[in-house]
Amino acid sequence: NAGVTQTPKFQVLKTGQSMTLQCAQDMNHEYMSWYRQDPGMGLRLIHYSVGAGITDQGEVPNGYNVSRSTTEDFPLRLLSAAPSQTSVYFCASHRGRGYEQYFGPGTRLTVT
Amino acid sequence: AQSVTQPDIHITVSEGASLELRCNYSYGATPYLFWYVQSPGQGLQLLLKYFSGDTLVQGIKGFEAEFKRSQSSFNLRKPSVHWSDAAEYFCAVARGIQGAQKLVFGQGTRLTINP
């Protein structure tokens, strides 16, 4: 199993550009989440999904969109990038309540 | 609202010394508690978790943590650290809404090991 994979590993965007961060898991987990990590703030939940077709907002959803058309994939879209979205983004998946979350290696995004 | 506090931003210990990383949480119900470790440039790896039962939990790499409800704490310990333990450590609390775990993380504690 590859576990949770994320692409790209690094990305530089200009303000106003849009892009999609890809996340895939091959563990048949129902639940998937997106977090951002900023210095001194730990990780904060952006959006999460409890199954294909079902998504909901986390703690810091503004400026991001998600969809979940398959169990395996959970892409994160930045609609119009802003410097405040410079961060490291982590995707995670888990089987459900009581089970640990598995994290991908992260995408480092810089918005200039 | 749930919150997690890790009071120590940076800790330095000598190799072979004991380690304790502090974590305090605020949560109304019985929490699900986790410790994750992040090596530089890597994702997060679970060290251990507490859901219920024995309040002293054992994890990987020789780590353990003790849940103390009266102190709202879940401190991580290791009796003798190795240079490879240098990393950032995150405490997290899970709440279940719609059956999903929405982790709330602390700010992290960066651990440096002196040779």
Image (cartoon, coloured by chain):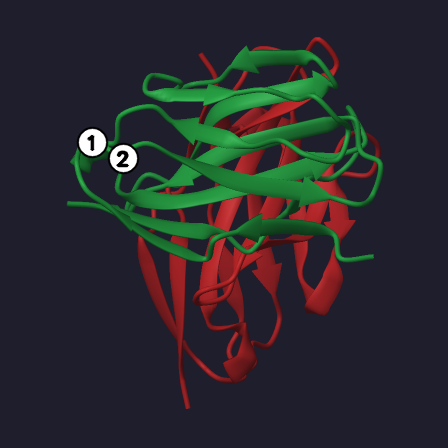
Chain colours: A green, B red
A46, B39: nearer the viewer:
A46
Amino acid marked by disc 2: Gln
Q: Residue farthest to the bottom?
A: B115
SS at badge 2:
helix
Left or right: where does residue A56 sit relative to residue B2?
right
B114, A54: nearer the viewer:
A54
Q: Is residue A2 above or below residue B50?
A: below
Label 2: which residue? A85
> Does residue B106 appear anywhere in the picture?
no
Label 1: which residue? A82
Chain at numbered mark 2: A
Q: Is residue A96 above or below residue B9?
A: above
Left or right: where does residue B89 sit relative to residue B65?
left
Q: Is residue B9 above or below residue B31?
A: below
Relative image position of residue B72 (x, y in whole percent)? 54, 28
Relative image position of residue B113 (x, y in whole percent)? 42, 78
Query: Looking at the image, do the residues carrying marks 2 and 1 touch, with CB atoms under 8 Å apart?
Result: yes
A84, B57: nearer the viewer:
A84
Residue at 38%, 60% in the rendered image: B110
Residue at 74%, 52% in the rendered image: A3
> In which quadrant is the N terminus of chain A drawn?
bottom right
Left or right: where does residue B23 sit relative to residue B62?
left
Number of numbered discs: 2
Relative image position of residue A61 (x, y in whole percent)? 40, 18
Residue at 69%, 37% in the rendered image: A93
Residue at 84%, 32% in the rendered image: B53
Amino acid marked by disc 1: Ala
Please identify the quarter of the rendering in which residue A10 is found.
bottom left
